Structures are given as structure tokens and as C-alpha cells.
Amino acid sequence: MYQEYIDFIVPLAKQVAKLQLSYFRTDRLGIETKSNISDVVTRADKESEELIAKAIFEKYPDHKILGEEGGFRGNEDSQCLWVVDPLDGTTNFSQGIAIFSISIALQYNGETIAGVVYAPYLDELFVATKGGGAYMAYHGGELKKIHVAGKKHLDSSVIATGFPYDKVTNPDNNTKETSRIVPLVRDLRRLGSAAHDLCCVASGILDGYWEMSLKIWDVCAGILIVEEAGGEVLHYRDDRSLSVIAGNETIVRQIEKIISPDWNPNSKI
Ligand code: IPD
Ligand code: CA
Ligand code: CA
């Protein structure tokens, strides 16, 4: 079920990847800032979204799209909403750091039914359909079923996080949570693409991940991919747009305890 959407999105994502790689590590990035100096956008972000929107409307003229760069467009009465982050990890991309991804998801009546995340430079592809499982392919290989890691203890876990763009002006910026968790895990990563972070959790590359103040386009495909890989995605606070913890059930509970404002460092995890 829903395979037709995956068959449509995967070649599209690979076409967009070619465009992004043609700009990557060149002097033609066209970097501009958005909400503040930390929040950047490049020519590749904008052109990628246009390419994706054009392809979606050519194939599905009655659908609507929510994209990071272009907002809502299309038939507002449609029950089919494409949620698109054309380039997730723009800070990495703009610096020449290889971790960035394209995230495309389809929601029907508010439920995510198909999701694809593709990391162009790493050539890592993650796909999932509702009820159909999650799969990964890399370096042009075959899609293989993926599953979240099975670790039960944080001290042997490698987890990732991220920081919100308003971190300079808002002290509620995940630094307190990070300093609490660092001594309790094998190691912590800030990899720089939320969509790809979630897919690393789905495939067991990371044992867990949490981040606050995300947008729907960062996580729409990735959440489906984690859930279809047998993982849990917990929305741990609702006052800073989307804030999620992902992993297997046990790891999610442990991260939740430690980042909670009333965590007592003397208590057991
Ligand atoms: C960002 C990345 C980053 C996360 C930020 C997102 P963008 O998306 O996913 O890892 O920490 O919160 O906004 O701006 O590169 O599309
Ligand atoms: Ca993003
Ligand atoms: Ca983006």
C-alpha cells in the first residue's frame, strides 16, 4: 500500500540530490540569512523546493504542499498534503559538511502515509509507508528492512541532539539538557540534519535522539520512518513547536527523565 508514492518520491529526491551536489563545496552557494545570523538559506534550498513542487503538481495537480521555503500552495481543500524540507541541514551544506538531506512526506487527512529521506552526499536512502515497514539503501545498493537499536542502557548509547535557531536570545535552548546528559551516555553527537538524525535512529546507527523547537517539515518523514522501524517518537513538550525524543521505548524513557526540568541527578535512570 502507498508504494506508488515511494516510487514517485525516490527518483525525484535523487534528481534534487544532483542539483544540490552541483552547488556543494562551490562558490555559487548564494548564502543568505533568515530569522537571524544562525539561520541560513542557499540557492540550493530554494531551487530544490521549486523542483519538488513542480514535480508534485505535474503528477498530482489536486494536492497541496507545505514546504519550508515556499509555505502552503496548491488546492487548500485537498486531503493530501506533501510536507517538504528541500534541504535539511543547510548549515552543514553551506560549510561543505557532508551531512544534509532531502525530506519529503505525504499526509492523508493529517496522517503521514509515506516518507522518504535521502542524503545526497552520503548516498543514504530511507523510506517508509504507513504499516509497510521502514527500509534503507546506501551507495546504490538494495533497500533493506531496518529496525531501531535494542540497547537498554544510556551509558553504552550514542545519541544525538540539536539546538534551536533562537538559541542566542532564548536561554531555554537545550544547553542545560545537553550538559545533564553528556556524562551519562557513551557519547553525544550534533550531526546537523534532524531528518537524517531520525533515520539514523530508525536504522540503529544512533541509539537515540532528542531535539526541541523543530518544524513539521524537519520531522514528518523521519517520524514515520522511526515508527515503522519499531521505534517510539515522544512529543515531550508542546510549548516550543515540535519537540521530540526518538529511540526504542526504553531509551526514550531514559532520555525523557534526564531532560525533564525536575530531573534529580542523584536519582536512578
Ligand atoms: C535544521 C536542521 C538541524 C536542526 C534545526 C533545523 P534546516 O533544518 O534539521 O539539524 O537542529 O532545528 O531547523 O534549517 O537545515 O532545514
Ligand atoms: Ca530542516
Ligand atoms: Ca531546510
Image (spheres, helix red, strand yellow):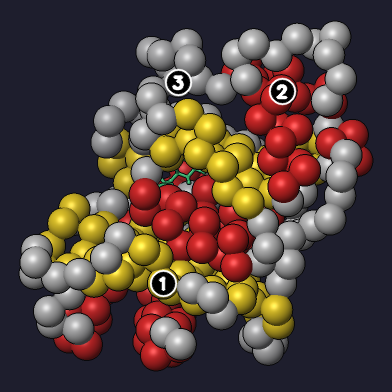
Beta carbon of the mark 3 residue lies under 8 A of ligand 1: no
Up the image or down, 208 lies above or below 126; here it is above
Q: Would residue 41 be found to the left or right of residue 180 on screen?
A: left
Q: Would residue 140 be found to the left or right of residue 223 on screen?
A: right
Q: Residue 191 falls in which quadrant of the image? A: top right
> Which comes sooner in the sequence, label 1 or label 3?
1
> Which residue position is annotated with label 1?
113
From where the camera sits, is residue 249 visible? yes
Q: CA distance from mark 1 to mark 3?
A: 33 Å
Residue shown at 30% from the left, 70% from the top: 108
Residue shown at 71% from the left, 36% from the top: 253
Label 1, secondary structure: give it.
strand
Residue shown at 24% from the left, 53% from the top: 69
Amino acid marked by disc 1: Ile
Tell me the number on the disc at residue 167.
Answer: 3
Q: CA distance from mark 3 to mark 2?
A: 20 Å
Amino acid marked by disc 2: Ile
